[in-house]
Image (tube, rainbow, N blue to C red):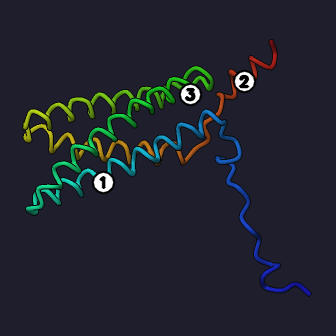
Protein backbone atom coordinates (compact mmCIF):
# COMPACT_ATOMS: atom_id res chain seq x y z
CA UNK A 1 0.00 0.00 0.00
CA UNK A 2 1.43 3.37 -1.04
CA UNK A 3 1.42 6.24 1.38
CA UNK A 4 0.62 9.80 0.43
CA UNK A 5 4.29 10.73 0.63
CA UNK A 6 5.25 7.96 -1.78
CA UNK A 7 2.53 8.86 -4.29
CA UNK A 8 3.74 12.45 -4.63
CA UNK A 9 6.48 12.52 -7.20
CA UNK A 10 9.49 14.52 -6.22
CA UNK A 11 10.25 17.09 -8.86
CA UNK A 12 13.34 16.33 -10.86
CA UNK A 13 15.54 19.04 -12.26
CA UNK A 14 13.74 20.87 -15.01
CA UNK A 15 14.70 20.09 -18.56
CA UNK A 16 16.10 23.62 -19.00
CA UNK A 17 18.30 23.27 -15.94
CA UNK A 18 19.48 19.83 -17.02
CA UNK A 19 20.61 20.95 -20.48
CA UNK A 20 22.31 24.22 -19.56
CA UNK A 21 26.09 24.24 -19.96
CA UNK A 22 28.62 25.55 -17.45
CA UNK A 23 29.04 28.72 -19.51
CA UNK A 24 25.29 29.21 -19.36
CA UNK A 25 25.29 28.74 -15.60
CA UNK A 26 27.98 31.41 -15.22
CA UNK A 27 25.88 33.85 -17.25
CA UNK A 28 22.82 32.96 -15.19
CA UNK A 29 24.72 33.59 -11.96
CA UNK A 30 25.95 36.98 -13.13
CA UNK A 31 22.51 38.02 -14.38
CA UNK A 32 21.06 36.96 -11.01
CA UNK A 33 23.59 39.01 -9.07
CA UNK A 34 23.00 41.88 -11.50
CA UNK A 35 19.25 41.86 -10.93
CA UNK A 36 19.66 41.87 -7.14
CA UNK A 37 22.13 44.75 -7.30
CA UNK A 38 20.05 46.84 -9.69
CA UNK A 39 16.86 46.35 -7.65
CA UNK A 40 18.64 47.97 -4.70
CA UNK A 41 19.28 51.17 -6.62
CA UNK A 42 15.73 52.60 -6.43
CA UNK A 43 15.68 51.71 -2.74
CA UNK A 44 18.89 53.65 -2.08
CA UNK A 45 17.61 56.58 -4.13
CA UNK A 46 14.39 56.52 -2.11
CA UNK A 47 16.34 56.53 1.15
CA UNK A 48 18.20 59.62 -0.05
CA UNK A 49 15.04 61.35 -1.24
CA UNK A 50 13.34 60.69 2.09
CA UNK A 51 15.96 62.85 3.79
CA UNK A 52 18.71 60.41 4.78
CA UNK A 53 21.72 61.84 2.99
CA UNK A 54 23.72 58.63 3.53
CA UNK A 55 21.41 57.11 0.93
CA UNK A 56 23.23 59.06 -1.79
CA UNK A 57 26.51 57.35 -0.86
CA UNK A 58 24.77 53.97 -0.91
CA UNK A 59 23.26 54.82 -4.30
CA UNK A 60 26.70 55.77 -5.67
CA UNK A 61 28.28 52.58 -4.28
CA UNK A 62 25.41 50.59 -5.76
CA UNK A 63 25.97 52.27 -9.12
CA UNK A 64 29.61 51.20 -9.03
CA UNK A 65 28.59 47.63 -8.18
CA UNK A 66 25.87 47.45 -10.84
CA UNK A 67 28.18 48.82 -13.51
CA UNK A 68 31.00 46.43 -12.57
CA UNK A 69 28.66 43.44 -12.57
CA UNK A 70 27.37 44.54 -15.98
CA UNK A 71 30.88 44.54 -17.41
CA UNK A 72 31.52 41.06 -15.98
CA UNK A 73 28.26 39.98 -17.56
CA UNK A 74 29.54 41.22 -20.93
CA UNK A 75 32.50 38.85 -20.61
CA UNK A 76 30.20 35.94 -19.74
CA UNK A 77 27.89 36.82 -22.65
CA UNK A 78 30.88 36.84 -25.01
CA UNK A 79 31.74 33.35 -23.78
CA UNK A 80 28.15 32.21 -24.37
CA UNK A 81 28.37 33.61 -27.89
CA UNK A 82 31.71 31.92 -28.61
CA UNK A 83 31.11 28.57 -26.91
CA UNK A 84 27.36 28.12 -27.38
CA UNK A 85 26.89 30.11 -30.60
CA UNK A 86 24.14 32.24 -29.07
CA UNK A 87 24.48 35.94 -29.85
CA UNK A 88 21.19 36.97 -28.20
CA UNK A 89 22.50 37.16 -24.62
CA UNK A 90 25.49 39.20 -25.80
CA UNK A 91 23.35 41.68 -27.73
CA UNK A 92 20.93 42.09 -24.82
CA UNK A 93 23.78 42.50 -22.35
CA UNK A 94 25.48 45.11 -24.53
CA UNK A 95 22.24 47.10 -24.76
CA UNK A 96 21.78 46.98 -20.98
CA UNK A 97 25.41 47.87 -20.25
CA UNK A 98 25.34 50.76 -22.73
CA UNK A 99 22.20 52.12 -21.05
CA UNK A 100 23.75 51.64 -17.59
CA UNK A 101 26.90 53.48 -18.64
CA UNK A 102 24.89 56.44 -19.95
CA UNK A 103 22.80 56.29 -16.80
CA UNK A 104 25.91 56.25 -14.60
CA UNK A 105 27.33 59.40 -16.16
CA UNK A 106 23.93 61.11 -16.23
CA UNK A 107 23.64 60.51 -12.49
CA UNK A 108 27.16 61.75 -11.83
CA UNK A 109 26.47 64.95 -13.76
CA UNK A 110 23.08 65.50 -12.08
CA UNK A 111 21.03 65.12 -15.27
CA UNK A 112 18.01 63.67 -13.45
CA UNK A 113 15.79 64.23 -16.51
CA UNK A 114 17.77 61.40 -18.14
CA UNK A 115 18.98 59.49 -15.08
CA UNK A 116 15.55 58.62 -13.63
CA UNK A 117 13.72 57.37 -16.76
CA UNK A 118 16.81 55.52 -17.97
CA UNK A 119 17.10 53.96 -14.51
CA UNK A 120 13.57 52.62 -14.74
CA UNK A 121 14.27 51.20 -18.19
CA UNK A 122 17.50 49.50 -17.11
CA UNK A 123 15.85 47.89 -14.09
CA UNK A 124 13.09 46.52 -16.33
CA UNK A 125 15.64 45.35 -18.93
CA UNK A 126 17.72 43.43 -16.38
CA UNK A 127 14.59 41.81 -14.91
CA UNK A 128 13.50 40.75 -18.42
CA UNK A 129 16.99 39.42 -19.09
CA UNK A 130 16.86 37.48 -15.80
CA UNK A 131 13.59 35.86 -16.87
CA UNK A 132 15.00 35.08 -20.32
CA UNK A 133 18.17 33.32 -19.15
CA UNK A 134 16.30 31.25 -16.57
CA UNK A 135 13.34 30.28 -18.79
CA UNK A 136 15.23 28.25 -21.40
CA UNK A 137 18.43 26.23 -21.54
CA UNK A 138 21.68 27.87 -22.53
CA UNK A 139 23.32 25.24 -24.68
CA UNK A 140 24.90 24.91 -28.11
CA UNK A 141 22.34 25.30 -30.86
CA UNK A 142 21.12 21.88 -32.10
CA UNK A 143 21.88 22.44 -35.81
CA UNK A 144 25.42 23.51 -35.06
CA UNK A 145 25.84 20.71 -32.57
CA UNK A 146 24.79 18.24 -35.27
CA UNK A 147 27.31 19.76 -37.71
CA UNK A 148 30.02 19.48 -35.06
CA UNK A 149 29.17 15.80 -34.52
CA UNK A 150 29.36 15.13 -38.28
CA UNK A 151 32.84 16.68 -38.56
Indicate whether 15 appears above or below 146: below
Q: Quadrant of residue 8?
A: bottom right
- The residue located at (57%, 38%) in the rendering is 26
Q: Is residue 31 left or right of residue 22?
A: left
Q: Nearer the viewer, residue 63 or 93?
A: 63
Closer to the chain start, of discs 2 and 1, is 1
The alpha-carbon separation of the residues under discs 1 and 3 comes to: 27 Å
Q: Is residue 123 left or right of residue 12?
A: left
- The residue located at (17%, 60%) in the rendering is 47
What element does badge 2 sit on?
A: helix
| Quadrant for the N terminus in the image | bottom right
Q: In this figure, which residue is indicated by the disc labeled 1? A: 40
What element does badge 1 sit on?
A: helix
- The reply to whether discs 3 and 2 touch (Cβ–Cβ < 8 Å) is no
Q: Nearer the viewer, mark 3 or mark 2?
A: 3
Indicate whether 151 appears above or below 126: above
Closer to the chain start, of discs 3 and 2, is 3
Q: In this figure, which residue is indicated by the disc labeled 3? A: 80
- How many neighbours does mark 3 have within 10 angstroms: few (below 14), some (14-19), or many (20 or more)? many
Q: Is residue 122 left or right of residue 109?
A: right
Q: Position of residue 83 (x, y in %)?
A: 62, 23
Q: In this figure, which residue is indicated by the disc labeled 2? A: 145
Amino acid sequence: MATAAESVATPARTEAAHRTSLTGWILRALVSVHVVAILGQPVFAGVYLSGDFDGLGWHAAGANAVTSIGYLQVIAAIMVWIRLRQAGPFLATMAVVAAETVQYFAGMSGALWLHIPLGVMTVVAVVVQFIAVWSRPLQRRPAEQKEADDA
